Image: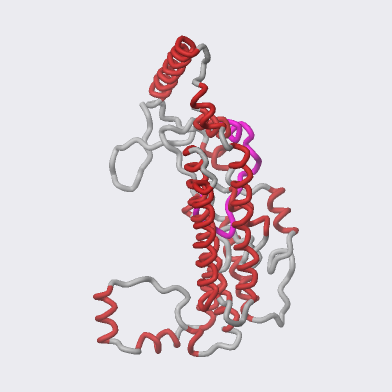
Amino acid sequence: MPSALANGSDTHVLRARALRAAEQLDRYLPSQSSQEKLSSAPSSGLSTPVADDAPPSVQSISSARKQVRAQAKTRLFYNIDYQPRLSHFDPNSDNQNFRGFFVLFWISLAIMVITTVLRNVKDTGYPLRMQVWLLFSANVFQLALCDLAMVVSTGVTLPLHRAISSSKGWLRWNQYGIVVQSSFQLVWLTIWVALPFMLDWTWTAQVYLTLHTLTLLMKMHSYAFYNGHLSETQRRLSSLDKPDSDSLSAAIRYPKSPIRAAEENSEIGVSNDKRDCKQPVSKLRSDLATELTSPLGHVTYPQNLTWWNYIDFLLCPTLCYELEYPRTKKTQRTRVLVKALAVFGVFSY
């Protein structure tokens, strides 16, 4: 009888469960080699001690990183967003309900492919229809070069944010930095969407480049605006070394409904600002430092503004940028091969 895991709602719905939980989940822990590699990198509070006379902002970042890494040692997953969730369709699930479905699906797919090939051989003498192949192979070299140029052109965001991070004038993110970044994204999108139509490519090449353009636009937007937020957070943290009334507002403000905001404005008035000013500076400094630290506790803004970090984000299968992503203890070559074959198989089919 298959076992069921509690899902918090007192129901008897069967949930997927790993075959060997200890072994399967252990691979998500950071490996010894990765820890040594990270510890060898220059960082504040990890391998390089913080000086006693360092500014309070530097000491708070070091303390936040140590606290995050200490919490990570007491739990398996560093952040709930990174927790691996097995499904019924995962080969590592011990629920065998869908094994027959898998077999039936692949048998049906094999029958369909064989009948299609036989029909093509009967009609054209070739296993594949040459018209479709010519349609996909047209403009392939121009497409590859344009796609590479498009990916490289997104790298303008990195030096721009390095300048925004170190700027003390008009290029700050909350001033004109966000305007410059948004203008660049608009011009970049216009160029790469119009290019395939100007070159009169086939519709397959136009669709591919347009979809890839939209994907990279979302990646670039996430990278730029998250780092822009962190740049202002880092600026506020540095300003607490010499605090004033403007720098003592809450580290994170949650949105409120218009009705609730109107009621608070009419009843409380300016009392919110006074209450924020009473917030302890140490608590606010700790919140800001935690905001600048990755969930794994190894990377702190602006240490992430490197080419390696940016290229790694482009290759990660996610549209949401994070300072650091969890790693398995070793590369699962079989899994990578299966995923690669699946991607090229979908395009080929």
Q: Is residue 71 visible?
A: no
Q: What residue is drawn where x is 69% and y is 50%?
A: 34
> Quick check: 297 above or below 325?
below
- Range covered by the magenta-colored residues: 318-338
> Quick check: 82 above or below 141?
below
Q: Quadrant of residue 303?
A: bottom right
Whether residue 34 sits left or right of residue 154 in the image: it is right
Colour scheme employed for the rendering of this structure: secondary structure
Residue 142: x, y in percent? Answer: 61, 42
- Which corner quadrant holds the N terminus? top left
Most common SS among magenta residues: loop
- Please name whichever residue, 323 or 60, is drawn nearer the observer in this view of the structure: 323
- Please name whichever residue, 97 or 148, is drawn nearer the observer in this view of the structure: 148
Residue 200: x, y in percent? Answer: 51, 43
Q: Quadrant of residue 116?
A: top left
Residue 337: x, y in percent? Answer: 60, 32
Is residue 324 part of the magenta span, yes or no? yes
Q: What residue is drawn where x is 52% and y is 78%?
A: 175
Residue 346: x, y in percent? Answer: 49, 31
> Quick check: 234 above or below 208?
below
Q: Is residue 27 visible?
A: yes
- Please name whichever residue, 190 or 116, is drawn nearer the observer in this view of the structure: 190
Q: Quadrant of residue 106?
A: top left
Q: What residue is drawn where x is 57% and y is 48%?
A: 316
Is residue 235 part of the magenta span, yes or no? no
- Please name whichever residue, 332 or 104, is drawn nearer the observer in this view of the structure: 104
Count of labels in the image: 0
